[in-house]
Image (cartoon, rainbow, N blue to C red):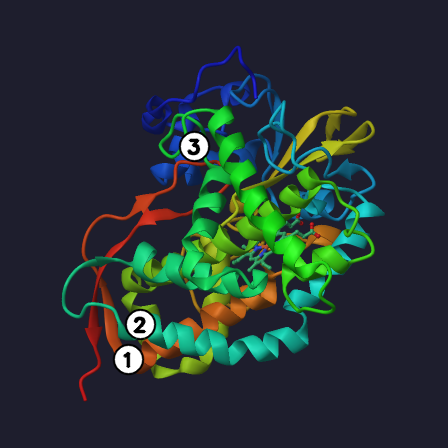
Amino acid sequence: MSDSYPMPTEDQVNIDPYSLPLAEINVANPYLFAHDVHGKWFRRLRDEAPVHYCVDSFFGPYWSVTRYDDIMTVDTSHAVFSSEPVITIREPFEDFPLPMFIAMDPPKHDEQRKVVAPVVGPENLKNFESIIRERTADVLEHLPLGESFNWVERVSIELTTRMLATLFDFPFEERSKLTYWSDVATAVPGLGLIESEDERKQVMLECLEYFTGLWNERVNRPGGNDLVSMLAHGEATKNMGPVEYLGNLILLIVGGNDTTRNTMTASVLSLANNPDQFEKLVADPSLIPSMVAETIRWQTPLAHMRRTAKVDTELGGQQIRAGDKVVMWYVSGNRDERVFERPDDFIIDRPNVRKHLAFGFGIHRCMGNRLAELQLKILWEEILKRFERIELAGDVQRSVSVFVHGYTGLPVIAHPRRP
Ligand code: HEM
């Protein structure tokens, strides 16, 4: 992050991107996403400068990669585009860098990922299915009927937090701590939740202290299918220092939390806004998995991943130098008209629905994608059993972030099925 540039402001929201010279385009403004006006900025880049250099920004200079095919090239070329030292456009916290395997290159990345991958392996997923269904039913059964409530809080956050508690075998009654740590880890200081990097550090250290207690309980106990036991016993992770333990915890907390949460909210929002698609789903519930994939494409819960060029290279006719920051905007690749017909429309049975980039590609492809899809599928199976429709009851509130592409509020009214 550059100290010499002020915080991005809301003014840019009212600017027509086509009125600016290409060189002045800077898409890394969280307010563009909060106001849902980023789409036209990315369309201009895709059409006119698909590999685009922004010289000055709050986050320093960076390349934007906005077309599907170029994103795929970067994501699958880890020897050229490194995930170190960090995978977001923000620089690592200077006095408190958190190592985590998503921000490592081979061989260390591969070794650590292998330790925790079984938590979402086929066997665990099979066991999770009934737990997820039970909890989903419980949350839906307790919703107020015929009156407005915030879907984000009552359903999306509640369900993803319960899932996280299961993955970590975290004390269930204290599970709201997980949501809080996840939110603090990704918050921008000064925009609500925290005021400074120092405050973030304090909260992160509380998180470490809590999880150190869980590690100590489990390190001498054999086995354990939960993430803490896996990290404490795994060959590649058992000797990690505390800060690396914290880094990997944050990865696993944030990875499984915001993303699935925002997809759950997006599914309600997009089906309510597209009644023809909702009718299609009700008429043929076997379309649920396809609808889930379309929601993940349409929402793209993580707007970008960042890489750093290891060597001088060429991409889309542009010369990228070793050390340059390269941002893959998944949120743009998933709306690339060269790959998706009518990309801004929500079409639950589009033929190439699973082709989206929202889980990334290559060696860092999302580890929890099957779990996220399973949670979403069960949610909609259970919703269709109980509710005739979920109606929007106010304005949606969106996250102010260039990374987490999601929602803080969605007022709705749930209408039960008539007997
Ligand atoms: C709709 C939900 C989700 C979305 C959109 C999503 C998206 C992503 C993306 C874009 C990446 C980076 C891919 C890349 O760099 O190529 C990633 C990595 C990762 N995700 Fe997810 N994710 C979701 C759910 C989950 C869940 C439920 C978990 C929990 C287990 C999870 C855990 C991870 C982990 C551990 C990584 C790092 C993988 C690595 O570096 O090898 N994700 N995810």
On the image, the x and y values in percent for residue 404 come to 48, 43
Compare residues 84 and 225 and report the one nearer the observer: 225
Of callouts 3 and 1, which one flags the residue occurring earlier in the amino acid sequence?
3
Give the residue furthest to the left: 146
Of callouts 2 and 3, which one flags the residue occurring earlier in the amino acid sequence?
3
Q: Quadrant of ligand 1?
A: bottom right
Tell me the mark number nearer the camera, choosing from 2 and 1.
Answer: 2
Badge 1: few (under 14), some or many (20 or more) residues near its Cα, within 10 Å? Answer: some
Q: Residue at x 14, y 68 (%)?
A: 146
Q: Which mark is residue 404?
A: none
Pointers 2 and 1 in contact (CB under 8 A)? yes
Viewed as shown, does residue 63 lie left or right of 269? right
Q: Name which residue type carries label 3.
A: Pro
Q: Which mark is residue 30?
A: 3
Q: What residue would you read off at disc 2? A: 140
Whether residue 178 can be seen here: yes
Viewed as shown, does residue 147 lie left or right of 59? left
Q: Residue at x 45, y 60 (%)?
A: 160
**Image position of 213 with respect to 208: above or below:** below
Q: Which mark is residue 386?
A: 1
Viewed as shown, does residue 261 lie left or right of 54? left
Quadrant for the C terminus in the image: bottom left
Q: Calculate the distance from the C-alpha at mark 3 to the C-alpha at mark 1.
A: 37 Å
Of callouts 2 and 1, which one flags the residue occurring earlier in the amino acid sequence?
2
